Amino acid sequence: MPLTPLDIHNKEFTRGFRGYSEDEVNDFLDQVIKDYEAVIREKKDLEETVSKLEEKISYFKNIEETLNKSILIAQETGEEVKRTASKEARLIVKEAEKNADRIINESLSKSRKISMEIDELKKQSSVYRTRFRMLIEAQLEMLKNDDWDSLNAPENLEGYELQEVKTEA
């Protein structure tokens, strides 16, 4: 067990035949007591300082751990956001490509349909022109025919009904 200043103060020495001077020993013990008390006070102060510093170190270590965890979480979150954004971008591009393909296919289909309609109209126009030409040629042939006067006779027109010529549009 360590000595206390009180232990030093209360220490009594036995007196011998030719012992030390009592006043010198007491003066020396008083000086030792003062120095020892100062060392004990300084030790207590240093222990308190060490304790406070250890508390601060513990506090800052906790902050450091929290910050490290926060940084890791932020990095993971950032990576996840990048992966999600990349996936979404790829999906958007795919969807846009699908829409573009659909629009192109629809346009091609409409173009083919219009082209077929144009071809059909050209055919109908050709048929109509041919029929009209034949009708006109038949009418011209009738005009060239010498029997025209005989056709106008009322006796020759009996039994004939006038028919309307139909034209296809």
Image (spheres, rainbow, N blue to C red):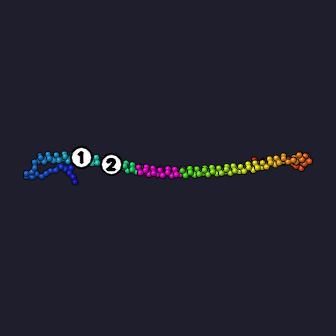
Secondary structure of the residue carrying tag 1 is helix
- Identify the mark at residue 57; answer none if there is no mark: 2
What predominant SS class does the magenta segment belong to? helix
Residue 96 visible? The answer is: yes
Residue 121 falls left or right of residue 108: right
Residue 107 falls left or right of residue 134: left
Q: Looking at the image, which residue is at 17% across and 47% down?
A: 32
Looking at the image, the residue that sits furthest to the bottom is 1
Q: Looking at the image, which residue is at 84% across and 47% down?
A: 144
Most foreground residue, 25 or 158: 158
Tell me where the magenta segment starts and ends, as one range.
Answer: 71-92
Q: Are marks 1 and 2 in contact (CB under 8 Å)?
A: no
Q: Which residue is mark 1?
A: 42
Tell me where residue 55 appears, x and y as whole percent: 32, 48
Secondary structure of the residue carrying tag 2 is helix
Most foreground residue, 127 or 10: 127
Q: For the residue marked with disc 2, what is the amino acid?
A: Ile
| Mark found first going from the N terminus, 1 or 2 | 1
Q: Looking at the image, which residue is at 58% across and 50% down?
A: 100
State the CA–CA distance, disc 1 to disc 2: 22 Å
- Identify the mark at residue 127; answer none if there is no mark: none
